[in-house]
Amino acid sequence: MTDRPILMFDSGIGGLTVLREARVLMPERRFVYVADDAAFPYGAWEEPALKARILDLFGGLLERFDPEISVVPCNTASTLVIDALRQAFSGHPFVGTVPAIKPAAERTRSGLVSVLATPGTVKRQYTRDLITQWATKCHVRLVGSDRLAQMAEIYMRDGFVDEQAVKDEIAPCFIEQDGRRTDIVVLACTHYPFLVNRMRKTAPWPVDWIDPAEAIARRALSLLDGSRGRRDDAGPDIAVFTSNRTDFATRRLMQGFGLTIQGT
């Protein structure tokens, strides 16, 4: 048995979509969820400053929690810094998250795929390299949204979202070309699955929405050293917010995910 946790790191609450899947696959494991809400949204940062911030944060997180593995569900962070994390902390395994372009290219019938992401993920060369590597036979449209991640945060805390605003944000994903229509939309931000029901409701036609959460959780499981039981004295799953400020709605949300908030 081990009490070394799995650490999950995200810019906000988006990574909870991956935590949810990881709990199904690894119910015996302990989790530490870290939300870098003090820096949210990551899309507003210049890349060098954000990269330095995340590397510095992980130096402290790995020392404090001694996780068995670290998962970075955030596409914006992963496409920027996952290689640097692996280099800086070479003895520690990391699971990154990149847009699910390969499975989308394999699954599409129309050949028209859209990738819905944050502006940071859209502009990253890493994302364009994935298209070159896996989707040369498809037309891939990159759609950057400034608002959806924040809307998901508000929705999960307050239970409200403006459906017209969701419709406006996803509208560029849907294109018609030579009698064909977009048939797959990749959700390239872990926040977005929280809004997928609203996306389905407001979409102009049905598409396959690809949520990578389960695949990320399975990758994490594959890197762990077998399935070991949880020690009775291992303690609760915890959530850490880098701002050290959480309101009632956030505390209630974390409790709903079985997480106890702990100060930084």
Image (spheres, helix red, strand yellow):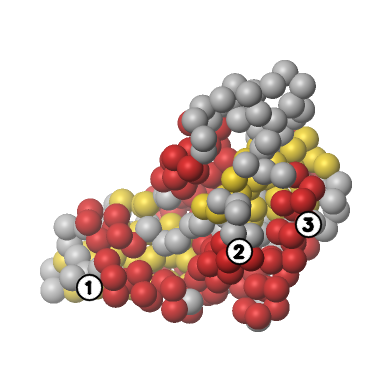
Q: Which image quadrant: the N terminus?
A: top right
Q: Is residue 261 visible?
A: yes
Q: Residue at x 61, y 73 (%)?
A: 43
**Circle nearer the N terminus (2, 1):** 2
Q: Residue at the location (13% across, 69% down)?
A: 179
Q: Which disc number belongs to residue 136?
A: 1
Location of mark 2 (residue): 85
* Tag of residue 204: none
Image position, residue 102 (x, y; %):
30, 60
Q: Residues within 10 Å of mark 2 (few under 14, many from 20)?
A: many
Q: Specify which label sits upstream in the sequence, 2 or 3.
A: 3
Check whether the beta carbons of the residues at disc 3 and disc 1 lie within 8 A of each other: no
Return the residue at label 3: 60
Percent position (x, y) of residue 190?
53, 54
* Residue drawn at x 74%, y 38% as measured from the top left: 238
Q: CA distance from mark 3 to mark 1?
A: 41 Å
